[in-house]
């Protein structure tokens, strides 16, 4: 018997106009209110609590207190309304916070279901009828719309940089940029500043208090701009037209991932032996002589 | 203090408003829209237009850093206003308004949009 896939489970719950929480393996939980998704949380993405505390608007202790107060009530919890009432954030900010956290979590929860790898295990899901999130209900997504948005986000990632290679690797900025001028977005700046050559995009997102998807997108954009070390630098990928000078400038070579692991494979040309370098020097000399 | 839906309905009461859409700039997603026939396409286009403006102006500004308050584009058929609102968690939320040039007052529309954005997001 085939195990029900995540999309069919969600479609069924939507049809039944169910209210409750759907636990997806250990990855996270999707909350539904009358058949529509009202919140989602994922272990890999920052939730509303983390986004709020990272913004400096409210302390972690105050969030915990608001949560406990909301859960302690018997009627449907509405911790979000309490936060708005206390002036921690506006109604619009709460809605945008819930919407952002839900989309971020959904992307990582649902993306494996969009294009399941053959033979991949379908995560076990369990529905708890009537369970609600402590924030209450502040924004809705219908189930097909949510899948559609996840597909759109996936396509957007692939448009930025069509390889998932950087997604799970530590983010390692190159020591020198491949040009003289670079324009960065605010989040790209934060990613570069936060990159300590060990943190992966997901870890950076958590540290920065930024959505994991936005961070991933920033990382892929930085990769596409040639600002991050990639494995292509050490593997036998097509090289840029001009050969890179390598061993002479130690720090740069060390930064490339795989330089340690694949030390047996010389991945960059030796400067002295590279005919292109010699040719370039000869052309330079000729040009200088012609100037005189 | 208002929510996302109210913010759009208020924007639509600005004299000359033809349509309004709220766009998440980072992902290019249409958060909510009023009177927009194809919100998805509009959201993608408007967030690209905003990105291009940011990049272009950053390159042409002496110190290289800019903070856009409003983007105003006048075409033969409409005024387009894009106002970024900084949020505390993610890149800006864009409120985009298309106005009928025969009925709209650009200065008034900008002031109203500013007021709406302050009531939606307190920053």
Image (cartoon, helix red, strand yellow):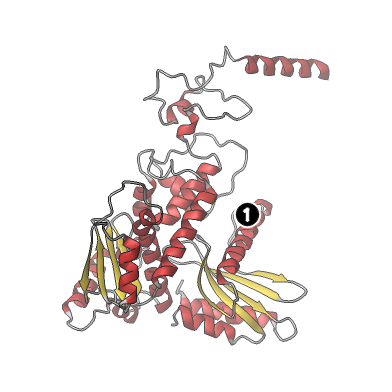
Q: Is residue A118 above or below residue B19?
A: above
Q: Position of residue A6 (x, y in %)?
A: 32, 61
Horizontal arrangement in the rendering, residue A231 relative to residue B10 (left or right): left
Q: Is residue A71 above or below residue A277?
A: below
Q: Residue at x 37, y 51 (%)?
A: A116
**Element type at mark 1:** helix
Considering depth in this image, is A105 or A57 the residue closer to the camera? A105
Quarter of the picture holding the C terminus of chain A = top right
The quadrant in which residue A274 appears is top right
Q: Position of residue B30 (x, y in %)?
A: 52, 69
From this viewpoint, which residue is outermost toward the front? A1
Considering depth in this image, is A237 or B95 the residue closer to the camera? A237
Residue A133 visible (yes or no) = no
Q: Which residue is mark 1?
A: B55
Q: Residue at x 38, y 40 (%)?
A: A170
Crowd rating for badge 1 (residues with CA inside 10 Å; few <14, some 14–19, many 20+): some
Horizontal arrangement in the rendering, residue B2 relative to residue A135 (left or right): right
């Amino acid at each position: 018997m085939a195990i029900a896939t995540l999309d069919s489970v969600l479609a069924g719950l939507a049809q039944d106009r169910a209210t409750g929480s759907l636990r997806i393996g250990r990855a996270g939980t999707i909350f539904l209110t009358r058949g529509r998704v009202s919140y989602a949380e994922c272990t890999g993405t920052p939730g509303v609590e983390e986004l709020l505390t990272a913004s400096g608007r409210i302390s972690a202790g105050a969030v915990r207190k608001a949560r406990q107060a909301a859960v302690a009530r018997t009627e449907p919890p509405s911790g979000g309304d309490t936060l708005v009432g206390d002036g921690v954030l506006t109604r619009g900010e709460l809605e945008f916070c819930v919407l952002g956290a839900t989309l971020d979590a959904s992307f990582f929860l649902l993306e494996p279901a969009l294009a399941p790898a053959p033979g991949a295990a379908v995560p076990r899901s369990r529905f708890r009828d009537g369970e609600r999130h402590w924030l209450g209900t502040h924004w809705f997504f219908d189930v097909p719309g949510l899948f559609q948005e996840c597909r759109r986000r996936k396509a957007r990632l692939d448009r930025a940089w069509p390889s998932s290679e950087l997604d799970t690797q530590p983010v390692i900025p190159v020591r020198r940029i491949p040009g003289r001028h670079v324009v960065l977005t605010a989040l790209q700046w934060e990613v570069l500043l936060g990159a300590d050559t060990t943190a992966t995009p997901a870890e950076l997102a958590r540290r920065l208090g930024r959505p994991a998807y936005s961070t991933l997108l920033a990382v892929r954009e930085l990769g596409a701009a040639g600002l991050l070390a990639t494995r292509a630098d050490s593997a036998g990928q097509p090289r840029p037209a001009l050969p890179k000078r390598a061993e002479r400038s130690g720090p740069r070579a060390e930064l490339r991932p795989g330089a340690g692991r694949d030390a047996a494979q010389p991945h960059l040309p030796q400067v002295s032996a590279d005919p292109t370098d010699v040719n370039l020097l000869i052309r330079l000399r000729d040009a200088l002589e012609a100037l005189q | 203090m208002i929510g996302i839906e109210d913010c759009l309905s208020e924007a639509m009461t600005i004299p000359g408003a033809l349509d309004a859409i709220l766009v998440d700039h980072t992902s290019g997603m249409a958060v909510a829209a009023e009177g927009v026939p194809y919100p998805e396409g509009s959201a993608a286009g408007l967030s690209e237009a905003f990105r291009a403006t940011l990049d272009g102006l950053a390159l042409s500004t002496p110190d290289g850093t800019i903070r856009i308050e409003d983007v105003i584009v006048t075409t033969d058929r409409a005024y387009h206003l894009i106002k970024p609102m900084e949020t505390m968690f993610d890149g800006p939320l864009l409120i985009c308004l298309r106005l009928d040039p025969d009925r709209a007052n650009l200065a008034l529309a900008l002031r109203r949009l500013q007021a709406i954005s302050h009531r939606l997001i307190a920053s």
